[in-house]
Image (cartoon, rainbow, N blue to C red):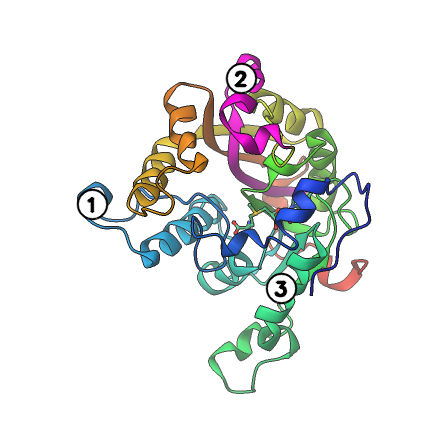
Amino acid sequence: MTQQPPPGDPDLPERVATIYGEDDLSTVPAFAGGFINFGYWARLPDIAGRPLSEADRIRSEQDLYRRVLGTFDRPRGSTALEVGCGRGLGCVLALEEFGLGMVIGLDAHPDQIARARTLHEALLTGPEPGSAAAKYRGRLDFLLGAAQRIPLPDAAVDCLYSVEAAQHFRDLPAFAREAARVLRPGGRLALTTFFARNQDAARALPELLPAYADGLDVPHVIDDAAAALAAAGLRDVRVQSIGDAVWEGYDLYMAQRPELRDEWPRRYLTAYETGLLDYYVITATAPGAAADVPAGTATAGAARAR
Ligand SMILES: C[S@@+](CC[C@H](N)C(=O)[O-])C[C@H]1O[C@@H](n2cnc3c(N)ncnc32)[C@H](O)[C@@H]1O
């Protein structure tokens, strides 16, 4: 199934192409259930006082989606774009739990899009009439494309969200401009991932975390990310730290797995505790008459390019 993106693709550097291609990061035991994120652990009961199961790990990854999607005011019926959708599990969660009218998952890696299409084939090709899933018919789609060049027309979506993907984007200002372009006036953006806390931290992180040293992740500084969104014309840009709900739970889970215990991923908690790194939710609104435009007026379904 592996389809390597063309070498030299600026949107998908070699390390990113490999880890989501032949290495299929979702199969690494630090993750579970097909998701690939560190998880939001604050809604799981008593995580410090008990063994953490794989089901807990999956729930943490789903809860990160719930944390992000929960920032949208009245999303029911809206058209949403997820940027960096991986296997598309968060797109289906958005449909099922948040009542979105249409969800488009975008990912820059052809293998991830192929996996998402295979996994959700029944929803994409039309579930059995009368089945529980029949109501999702025509409301899910997956597109190959990069955050920096979103293959959708202007004002195509009511909401745009992204979960643990922006650390890979080489050009955050280009993503910000694309987000502002594809959101309808008054549309909402919600993005979550980890960022360097300041410029000094961005310089120090590659020493501690190989993912920065080997070109998988970019140590974007949180203030620069927020400034890029504002410079693209998005307004009401708000940044919230959620690191206390992410790193400790993830580290507890890793500590309970002997095969993972001494691996470098546990250094994320160190990076958080020493003030280098934090996990954030950023929200923003596209310029225009928010109150005048009801959700569901975006045009993605009708007009987008494939
Ligand atoms: C850590 S995974 C997160 C996947 C999913 N959001 C989740 O939480 O399970 C990051 C995803 O972003 C995708 N990605 C990397 N760079 C991208 C880019 N420039 N534009 C769009 N997607 C990108 C990767 O292919 C991968 O599927």
Q: Residue at x 58, y 46 (%)?
A: 161
Q: Give the Cα distance between marks 1 and 2.
A: 33 Å
Q: Residue at x 37, y 49 (%)?
A: 60
Label 3 is placed on what type of residue?
A: Arg
- Please tell me which residue lies in front, 52 or 240: 52
Residue 118 drawn at (x, y percent): 62, 70
Element type at mark 1: loop
Question: Considering only order in the chain, which callout, 2 or 1, is on the residue closer to the N terminus?
Answer: 1
Left or right: residue 48 compared with residue 131:
left
Question: Considering only order in the chain, which callout, 2 or 3, is on the residue closer to the N terminus?
Answer: 3
Element type at mark 3: helix
- Please tell me which residue lies in front, 91 or 21: 21
**Residue, disc 3:** 115
Q: Residue at x 35, y 43 (%)?
A: 254
Left or right: residue 44 compared with residue 89:
left
Q: Is there a contact, CB below 8 Å, between mark 1 and mark 3?
A: no
Question: Considering only order in the chain, which callout, 3 or 1, is on the residue closer to the N terminus?
Answer: 1
Q: Is there a contact, CB below 8 Å, between mark 3 and mark 2?
A: no
Q: For label 3, count other residues whose C-alpha is less than 10 Å away and answer few (under 14), some (14-19) or many (20+).
A: some
- Report the magenta residues as a range: 185-214
Q: Residue at x 32, y 46 (%)?
A: 258
Q: For label 1, count other residues whose C-alpha is less than 10 Å away and answer few (under 14), some (14-19) or many (20+).
A: few
Residue 222 drawn at (x, y percent): 55, 24
Label 1 is placed on what type of residue?
A: Asp
**Residue, disc 1:** 46
Residue 193, above or below 200: below
- Please tell me which residue lies in front, 306 or 259: 259
Q: Give the Cα distance between marks 3 and 2.
A: 35 Å
**Residue, disc 2:** 204
Residue furthest out toward the left? 49
* The C terminus lies in quadrant: bottom right
* Disc number lying in front (1 or 2): 2
